[in-house]
Image: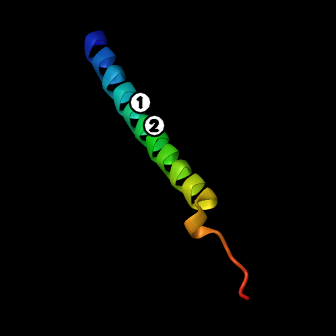
Amino acid sequence: MLELAAIWIIVIATFIWFFRDERRLRQARLEAQARYFATAPDYRHEASP
């Protein structure tokens, strides 16, 4: 019974680790994209003449 509980703890910990890591990677990609849009000259506001 103890072995079964240990297996389930490992499975749950693996899922939590995977989903947290995926969320962190998605956040890093979003930050890189936001940084690009904030600093790229193509997206800078230019006043009308």
Q: Nearer the viewer, residue 9 or 38?
A: 38
Q: Nearer the viewer, residue 31 or 18?
A: 31
Q: Nearer the viewer, residue 36 or 8?
A: 36
Is 14 rendered above or below residue 37?
A: above
Residue 42: percent from left, percent from top:
56, 68
Q: Is residue 46 left or right of residue 3?
A: right
Determine which residue is flagged by label 2.
Answer: 20
Is 34 rendered above or below residue 43?
A: above
Q: Nearer the viewer, residue 48 or 31?
A: 48
Locate the C terminus and report the quarter of the image it occupies: bottom right
Residue 48: percent from left, percent from top:
71, 87
Residue drawn at (49%, 40%), measured in percent from left and top?
24
> Badge 1: how crowded within 10 Å, few (<14), some, or many (20+)?
few
Helix, strand, or loop for circle 1?
helix
Residue drawn at (60%, 63%), measured in percent from left and top?
41
Asked if the residues shown at circle 2 and circle 1 are in contact, with their CB atoms under 8 angstroms apart, the answer is: yes
Dividing the picture into quadrants, the one containing residue 34 is bottom right
Name the residue furthest bottom: 49
Determine which residue is flagged by label 1.
Answer: 17
Q: How is the image coloured?
A: rainbow
Q: Is residue 26 left or right of residue 39?
A: left
Name the residue furthest front: 49
Q: Which amino acid type is shown beneath numbered disc 1?
A: Trp
Residue 5: percent from left, percent from top:
32, 18
Residue drawn at (63%, 59%), measured in percent from left and top?
38
Q: Which amino acid type is shown beneath numbered disc 2?
A: Arg
Separation of residues labelled 2 and 1 (CA atoms)? 5 Å
Is 46 rendered above or below residue 16?
A: below
Helix, strand, or loop for circle 2?
helix
